[in-house]
Image (cartoon, rainbow, N blue to C red):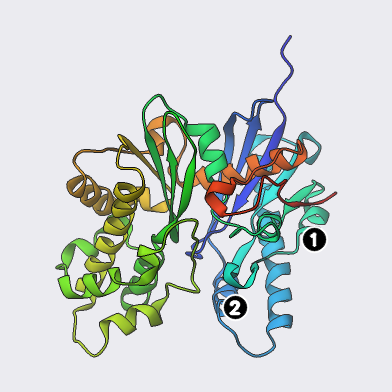
Amino acid sequence: MNQPRPLFIGIMSGTSLDGIDAVLASIGSDGEAAIEAAQSTPFSEGLRKALFDLQSSGPDEIHRENEAANALAQAYGGLVKALLNHARKKASDITAIGAHGQTIRHQPQFGYTHQTLNPALLAEITGIDVVADFRSRDLAAGGHGAPLVPAFHAQQFQSDVDVAILNLGGIANLTLLPKTGEVKGFDCGPGNMLMDAWIERHQQKSFDKDGAWSTQGRLHEELLARMLSDPFFKKAPPKSTGRDDFHLAWLEKHIAKEVIEAVDVQMSLLHLTVLSTLEAVMLHAPQTQKLIVCGGGAKNIALMNLMRTKAPQLEIISSDSVGVDAQLVEALAFAWLAWAHKEKRPANLPAVTGAKGLRILGACYPA
Protein backbone atom coordinates (compact mmCIF):
# COMPACT_ATOMS: atom_id res chain seq x y z
CA MET A 1 0.00 0.00 0.00
CA ASN A 2 1.39 3.42 -0.97
CA GLN A 3 2.25 5.76 1.87
CA PRO A 4 0.55 9.18 1.66
CA ARG A 5 2.92 11.89 0.51
CA PRO A 6 4.01 14.37 3.20
CA LEU A 7 2.28 17.74 3.29
CA PHE A 8 3.97 21.14 3.27
CA ILE A 9 2.64 24.69 3.26
CA GLY A 10 4.25 27.40 1.14
CA ILE A 11 3.62 31.11 1.77
CA MET A 12 4.59 33.92 -0.57
CA SER A 13 4.08 37.68 -0.43
CA GLY A 14 5.75 39.29 -3.41
CA THR A 15 7.45 42.53 -4.33
CA SER A 16 4.20 44.09 -5.53
CA LEU A 17 2.86 44.07 -1.96
CA ASP A 18 -0.56 43.04 -3.24
CA GLY A 19 -1.21 40.24 -0.76
CA ILE A 20 -0.33 36.79 0.53
CA ASP A 21 -0.73 33.41 -1.18
CA ALA A 22 -0.57 30.10 0.69
CA VAL A 23 -0.72 26.58 -0.70
CA LEU A 24 -0.99 23.16 0.87
CA ALA A 25 1.16 20.82 -1.20
CA SER A 26 1.86 17.12 -1.20
CA ILE A 27 5.45 16.38 -2.19
CA GLY A 28 6.81 12.99 -3.17
CA SER A 29 10.24 11.57 -2.44
CA ASP A 30 11.32 12.63 -5.94
CA GLY A 31 10.31 16.23 -5.25
CA GLU A 32 7.22 16.24 -7.45
CA ALA A 33 4.76 18.70 -5.90
CA ALA A 34 0.99 18.97 -6.23
CA ILE A 35 -1.31 21.64 -4.82
CA GLU A 36 -3.98 20.14 -2.55
CA ALA A 37 -5.57 23.43 -1.43
CA ALA A 38 -4.87 27.16 -1.54
CA GLN A 39 -5.91 30.40 0.12
CA SER A 40 -5.04 34.03 -0.59
CA THR A 41 -5.65 37.29 1.22
CA PRO A 42 -4.87 40.94 0.56
CA PHE A 43 -2.68 42.85 3.00
CA SER A 44 -4.43 45.07 5.49
CA GLU A 45 -3.85 48.69 4.52
CA GLY A 46 -1.82 49.29 7.68
CA LEU A 47 0.55 46.36 7.10
CA ARG A 48 0.91 47.14 3.41
CA LYS A 49 1.90 50.73 4.21
CA ALA A 50 4.32 49.61 6.93
CA LEU A 51 6.05 47.19 4.54
CA PHE A 52 6.10 49.73 1.72
CA ASP A 53 7.62 52.39 3.96
CA LEU A 54 10.38 49.96 4.95
CA GLN A 55 11.46 49.70 1.31
CA SER A 56 13.47 52.89 1.85
CA SER A 57 15.37 54.20 4.84
CA GLY A 58 13.60 56.26 7.47
CA PRO A 59 13.45 57.06 11.19
CA ASP A 60 13.25 54.33 13.85
CA GLU A 61 13.59 51.59 11.24
CA ILE A 62 14.59 48.80 13.64
CA HIS A 63 11.47 49.27 15.76
CA ARG A 64 9.18 49.70 12.74
CA GLU A 65 10.63 46.64 11.04
CA ASN A 66 10.19 44.41 14.06
CA GLU A 67 6.60 45.55 14.46
CA ALA A 68 6.00 44.78 10.77
CA ALA A 69 7.74 41.39 11.07
CA ASN A 70 5.42 40.45 13.95
CA ALA A 71 2.34 41.71 12.09
CA LEU A 72 3.39 39.76 8.98
CA ALA A 73 3.80 36.58 11.06
CA GLN A 74 0.29 37.14 12.46
CA ALA A 75 -1.09 37.61 8.93
CA TYR A 76 0.71 34.49 7.69
CA GLY A 77 -0.54 32.56 10.73
CA GLY A 78 -4.14 33.59 10.13
CA LEU A 79 -3.90 32.48 6.51
CA VAL A 80 -2.39 29.13 7.54
CA LYS A 81 -5.29 28.52 9.92
CA ALA A 82 -7.80 29.40 7.16
CA LEU A 83 -5.97 27.05 4.78
CA LEU A 84 -6.02 24.18 7.29
CA ASN A 85 -9.74 24.71 7.95
CA HIS A 86 -10.44 24.79 4.21
CA ALA A 87 -8.47 21.58 3.64
CA ARG A 88 -9.79 19.91 6.82
CA LYS A 89 -6.28 19.29 8.09
CA LYS A 90 -4.62 19.70 11.49
CA ALA A 91 -1.30 21.33 12.26
CA SER A 92 0.08 17.89 13.10
CA ASP A 93 -0.61 16.77 9.50
CA ILE A 94 1.91 19.30 8.12
CA THR A 95 5.64 18.60 8.00
CA ALA A 96 6.73 22.23 7.67
CA ILE A 97 5.85 25.69 6.39
CA GLY A 98 8.13 27.39 3.87
CA ALA A 99 7.78 31.14 4.41
CA HIS A 100 9.53 33.65 2.20
CA GLY A 101 8.83 36.80 4.23
CA GLN A 102 8.73 40.25 2.64
CA THR A 103 11.80 41.56 0.86
CA ILE A 104 12.62 45.05 2.09
CA ARG A 105 16.23 45.24 0.83
CA HIS A 106 18.07 43.34 -1.87
CA GLN A 107 21.72 44.40 -2.09
CA PRO A 108 23.75 41.36 -3.18
CA GLN A 109 26.57 43.64 -4.34
CA PHE A 110 27.07 44.42 -0.64
CA GLY A 111 26.59 40.79 0.41
CA TYR A 112 23.11 40.96 1.88
CA THR A 113 19.42 40.64 1.22
CA HIS A 114 16.73 41.00 3.85
CA GLN A 115 13.26 39.49 4.04
CA THR A 116 11.36 40.66 7.09
CA LEU A 117 9.36 38.11 9.10
CA ASN A 118 9.29 36.70 12.62
CA PRO A 119 9.43 32.96 11.79
CA ALA A 120 9.67 31.97 15.47
CA LEU A 121 6.36 33.72 16.10
CA LEU A 122 4.84 32.01 13.04
CA ALA A 123 5.91 28.62 14.43
CA GLU A 124 4.40 29.56 17.79
CA ILE A 125 1.09 30.68 16.24
CA THR A 126 0.66 27.68 13.94
CA GLY A 127 2.27 24.84 15.91
CA ILE A 128 4.13 23.85 12.71
CA ASP A 129 7.87 23.88 11.95
CA VAL A 130 8.75 26.97 9.89
CA VAL A 131 11.59 27.12 7.36
CA ALA A 132 12.53 30.70 6.43
CA ASP A 133 15.51 32.88 5.46
CA PHE A 134 16.13 30.92 2.26
CA ARG A 135 18.40 33.45 0.56
CA SER A 136 21.18 34.02 3.12
CA ARG A 137 23.03 30.73 2.62
CA ASP A 138 23.41 31.29 -1.10
CA LEU A 139 24.66 34.84 -0.48
CA ALA A 140 27.19 33.52 2.03
CA ALA A 141 28.52 31.29 -0.75
CA GLY A 142 29.01 34.30 -3.04
CA GLY A 143 25.66 34.17 -4.83
CA HIS A 144 22.89 36.71 -5.29
CA GLY A 145 20.43 34.72 -3.17
CA ALA A 146 18.06 35.06 -6.14
CA PRO A 147 16.27 33.91 -8.09
CA LEU A 148 15.52 30.80 -6.03
CA VAL A 149 12.62 29.34 -8.01
CA PRO A 150 14.59 27.91 -11.00
CA ALA A 151 15.49 24.71 -9.10
CA PHE A 152 11.78 24.19 -8.46
CA HIS A 153 10.88 25.09 -12.05
CA ALA A 154 13.39 22.50 -13.27
CA GLN A 155 11.69 19.92 -11.05
CA GLN A 156 8.15 20.85 -12.06
CA PHE A 157 8.25 21.95 -15.70
CA GLN A 158 11.03 20.01 -17.42
CA SER A 159 10.00 19.09 -20.97
CA ASP A 160 11.18 17.29 -24.09
CA VAL A 161 11.42 20.67 -25.85
CA ASP A 162 13.38 23.81 -24.95
CA VAL A 163 11.25 25.65 -22.40
CA ALA A 164 11.53 28.97 -20.59
CA ILE A 165 9.55 29.77 -17.46
CA LEU A 166 8.73 33.46 -16.99
CA ASN A 167 7.62 34.42 -13.51
CA LEU A 168 5.87 37.80 -13.62
CA GLY A 169 5.57 38.92 -10.03
CA GLY A 170 6.68 42.37 -8.95
CA ILE A 171 9.98 41.48 -10.60
CA ALA A 172 10.24 39.34 -13.75
CA ASN A 173 12.55 36.35 -13.60
CA LEU A 174 13.37 33.70 -16.14
CA THR A 175 14.25 30.04 -15.86
CA LEU A 176 15.74 28.50 -19.00
CA LEU A 177 15.14 24.76 -19.26
CA PRO A 178 16.89 23.34 -22.31
CA LYS A 179 15.89 19.77 -23.18
CA THR A 180 19.59 18.94 -22.73
CA GLY A 181 22.18 20.97 -20.85
CA GLU A 182 22.41 23.23 -17.85
CA VAL A 183 19.44 25.00 -16.25
CA LYS A 184 19.92 28.77 -16.16
CA GLY A 185 17.92 31.60 -14.69
CA PHE A 186 18.06 35.25 -13.67
CA ASP A 187 15.98 38.31 -12.90
CA CYS A 188 15.33 40.19 -16.12
CA GLY A 189 13.73 43.41 -14.85
CA PRO A 190 10.41 44.77 -13.60
CA GLY A 191 7.35 42.59 -13.91
CA ASN A 192 4.16 44.11 -12.46
CA MET A 193 5.78 46.38 -9.90
CA LEU A 194 6.01 49.63 -11.85
CA MET A 195 2.63 49.14 -13.52
CA ASP A 196 1.05 48.51 -10.10
CA ALA A 197 2.70 51.57 -8.54
CA TRP A 198 1.70 53.82 -11.45
CA ILE A 199 -1.96 52.82 -11.52
CA GLU A 200 -2.15 53.15 -7.75
CA ARG A 201 -0.88 56.71 -7.99
CA HIS A 202 -3.22 57.73 -10.82
CA GLN A 203 -6.28 55.48 -10.45
CA GLN A 204 -6.10 54.46 -6.78
CA LYS A 205 -6.18 50.81 -7.82
CA SER A 206 -3.71 48.19 -6.62
CA PHE A 207 -3.26 46.69 -10.11
CA ASP A 208 -4.40 47.09 -13.71
CA LYS A 209 -6.98 44.31 -14.02
CA ASP A 210 -6.55 42.50 -17.37
CA GLY A 211 -4.32 45.41 -18.48
CA ALA A 212 -7.52 47.32 -19.29
CA TRP A 213 -6.16 50.78 -18.42
CA SER A 214 -2.92 50.28 -20.34
CA THR A 215 -4.81 49.43 -23.53
CA GLN A 216 -6.48 52.85 -23.44
CA GLY A 217 -3.09 54.48 -23.85
CA ARG A 218 -0.55 54.87 -26.65
CA LEU A 219 3.03 53.70 -26.57
CA HIS A 220 5.51 56.53 -25.95
CA GLU A 221 8.48 55.28 -27.98
CA GLU A 222 11.03 57.70 -26.52
CA LEU A 223 10.10 56.89 -22.92
CA LEU A 224 10.31 53.18 -23.67
CA ALA A 225 13.74 53.61 -25.25
CA ARG A 226 15.00 55.60 -22.25
CA MET A 227 13.77 52.94 -19.82
CA LEU A 228 15.27 50.10 -21.85
CA SER A 229 18.63 51.92 -21.80
CA ASP A 230 19.01 51.09 -18.09
CA PRO A 231 22.32 49.21 -17.65
CA PHE A 232 20.59 46.37 -15.78
CA PHE A 233 19.05 45.04 -18.98
CA LYS A 234 22.46 44.64 -20.64
CA LYS A 235 24.15 43.13 -17.59
CA ALA A 236 25.18 39.50 -18.02
CA PRO A 237 23.74 36.87 -15.64
CA PRO A 238 23.91 35.92 -12.86
CA LYS A 239 21.92 38.97 -11.88
CA SER A 240 19.04 39.87 -9.60
CA THR A 241 17.09 43.02 -8.88
CA GLY A 242 14.22 44.42 -6.86
CA ARG A 243 12.55 47.57 -5.64
CA ASP A 244 16.01 48.97 -4.84
CA ASP A 245 16.57 49.38 -8.61
CA PHE A 246 13.10 49.82 -10.12
CA HIS A 247 10.72 52.23 -8.37
CA LEU A 248 8.64 55.34 -9.06
CA ALA A 249 11.63 57.68 -8.68
CA TRP A 250 13.42 55.62 -11.37
CA LEU A 251 10.40 56.02 -13.65
CA GLU A 252 10.10 59.75 -12.96
CA LYS A 253 13.78 60.20 -13.85
CA HIS A 254 13.07 58.71 -17.30
CA ILE A 255 9.93 60.79 -17.78
CA ALA A 256 12.02 63.84 -16.77
CA LYS A 257 10.21 67.10 -17.49
CA GLU A 258 8.32 65.75 -20.47
CA VAL A 259 4.52 65.92 -20.29
CA ILE A 260 3.20 62.41 -20.95
CA GLU A 261 -0.36 61.29 -20.34
CA ALA A 262 -0.52 58.92 -17.37
CA VAL A 263 -2.28 56.24 -19.42
CA ASP A 264 0.45 56.44 -22.07
CA VAL A 265 3.06 55.83 -19.36
CA GLN A 266 1.10 52.74 -18.33
CA MET A 267 1.10 51.42 -21.91
CA SER A 268 4.85 52.11 -22.12
CA LEU A 269 5.43 50.22 -18.87
CA LEU A 270 3.51 47.26 -20.29
CA HIS A 271 5.85 47.30 -23.29
CA LEU A 272 8.87 47.59 -20.98
CA THR A 273 7.94 44.37 -19.17
CA VAL A 274 7.15 42.49 -22.37
CA LEU A 275 10.14 43.61 -24.44
CA SER A 276 12.74 43.29 -21.68
CA THR A 277 11.65 39.74 -20.92
CA LEU A 278 11.41 38.63 -24.55
CA GLU A 279 14.80 40.17 -25.36
CA ALA A 280 16.29 38.25 -22.43
CA VAL A 281 14.85 34.99 -23.77
CA MET A 282 16.11 35.63 -27.29
CA LEU A 283 19.57 36.69 -26.08
CA HIS A 284 20.18 33.84 -23.66
CA ALA A 285 18.06 31.00 -25.06
CA PRO A 286 17.17 31.69 -28.71
CA GLN A 287 16.36 28.00 -29.22
CA THR A 288 13.37 28.31 -26.83
CA GLN A 289 10.17 26.86 -28.27
CA LYS A 290 7.74 27.26 -25.39
CA LEU A 291 7.36 30.04 -22.83
CA ILE A 292 5.34 29.19 -19.72
CA VAL A 293 4.20 32.33 -17.87
CA CYS A 294 3.32 32.33 -14.19
CA GLY A 295 2.80 34.93 -11.47
CA GLY A 296 0.16 37.64 -11.39
CA GLY A 297 1.28 38.94 -14.78
CA ALA A 298 -0.03 35.79 -16.43
CA LYS A 299 -3.55 37.06 -15.57
CA ASN A 300 -2.93 40.32 -17.45
CA ILE A 301 -4.73 39.73 -20.77
CA ALA A 302 -3.19 42.78 -22.48
CA LEU A 303 0.31 41.69 -21.45
CA MET A 304 -0.14 38.13 -22.68
CA ASN A 305 -1.63 39.35 -25.98
CA LEU A 306 1.25 41.78 -26.54
CA MET A 307 3.79 39.08 -25.75
CA ARG A 308 2.24 36.73 -28.32
CA THR A 309 2.20 39.53 -30.89
CA LYS A 310 5.86 40.39 -30.31
CA ALA A 311 7.05 36.75 -30.32
CA PRO A 312 4.84 34.76 -32.73
CA GLN A 313 7.56 32.11 -33.05
CA LEU A 314 7.05 31.09 -29.40
CA GLU A 315 4.27 29.00 -27.94
CA ILE A 316 3.29 31.25 -25.02
CA ILE A 317 1.00 29.73 -22.41
CA SER A 318 0.04 30.28 -18.78
CA SER A 319 1.16 27.70 -16.25
CA ASP A 320 -2.58 27.14 -15.73
CA SER A 321 -2.39 25.17 -19.00
CA VAL A 322 0.08 22.71 -17.49
CA GLY A 323 -1.81 22.20 -14.25
CA VAL A 324 -0.41 24.83 -11.85
CA ASP A 325 -2.40 27.98 -11.10
CA ALA A 326 -0.20 30.86 -12.29
CA GLN A 327 -0.87 32.89 -9.15
CA LEU A 328 0.30 30.05 -6.90
CA VAL A 329 3.56 28.90 -8.51
CA GLU A 330 5.79 30.91 -6.17
CA ALA A 331 3.94 29.80 -3.04
CA LEU A 332 4.26 26.20 -4.26
CA ALA A 333 7.98 26.82 -4.81
CA PHE A 334 8.42 27.78 -1.15
CA ALA A 335 6.58 24.65 -0.02
CA TRP A 336 9.08 22.75 -2.18
CA LEU A 337 12.01 24.70 -0.70
CA ALA A 338 10.82 23.72 2.79
CA TRP A 339 10.72 20.09 1.62
CA ALA A 340 14.25 20.40 0.22
CA HIS A 341 15.48 21.83 3.53
CA LYS A 342 13.93 18.98 5.51
CA GLU A 343 15.42 16.47 3.07
CA LYS A 344 18.85 18.17 3.37
CA ARG A 345 18.76 18.61 -0.39
CA PRO A 346 20.61 21.58 -1.93
CA ALA A 347 18.13 23.90 -3.61
CA ASN A 348 20.19 26.66 -5.17
CA LEU A 349 21.64 26.50 -8.66
CA PRO A 350 25.15 28.04 -8.83
CA ALA A 351 24.74 28.72 -12.57
CA VAL A 352 21.70 30.83 -11.67
CA THR A 353 22.76 32.68 -8.51
CA GLY A 354 26.53 32.76 -8.95
CA ALA A 355 27.19 30.88 -5.69
CA LYS A 356 30.39 28.86 -5.32
CA GLY A 357 28.45 25.63 -5.07
CA LEU A 358 25.27 23.82 -4.07
CA ARG A 359 23.95 24.72 -0.64
CA ILE A 360 21.08 23.64 1.63
CA LEU A 361 18.87 26.69 1.98
CA GLY A 362 16.83 28.05 4.87
CA ALA A 363 16.76 28.03 8.65
CA CYS A 364 14.25 25.92 10.59
CA TYR A 365 12.26 27.16 13.58
CA PRO A 366 10.74 24.06 15.22
CA ALA A 367 7.18 24.30 16.51
Q: Which mark is residue 121?
A: 1
Nearest the viewer among 285 and 53 is 285
Quadrant including the N terminus: top right
Q: Tag 2, which secondary structure?
A: loop
Q: Nearer the viewer, mark 1 or mark 2?
A: 2
Q: Is residue 148 left or right of residue 285?
A: right
Q: Is residue 210 left or right of residue 116?
A: left
Rendered position, 87 above or below 45? above
Residue 205 in view = no
Residue 110 in view = yes
Instruction: State the image coordinates of residue 85 (x, y, percent, origin top left).
Output: 68, 41
Residue sticking out furthest to the top: 1
Q: Residue at x 73, y 74 (%)?
A: 66
Q: Is residue 153 left or right of residue 1?
A: left
Callout 2 crowding tier (Cα within 10 Å): few <14, some 14–19, many ≥20: some
Q: Which residue is mark 2?
A: 54
Which quarter of the figure has residue 122? Answer: bottom right
Q: Residue at x 83, y 55 (%)?
A: 124
Identify which amino acid the numbered label 2 is placed on: Leu
Nearest the viewer among 84 and 169 is 169
Q: Residue at x 72, y 30 (%)?
A: 6
Labels 1 and 2: the sequence-earlier one: 2
The residues tagged by marks 1 and 2 sit, at their Cα atoms, a distance apart of 20 Å
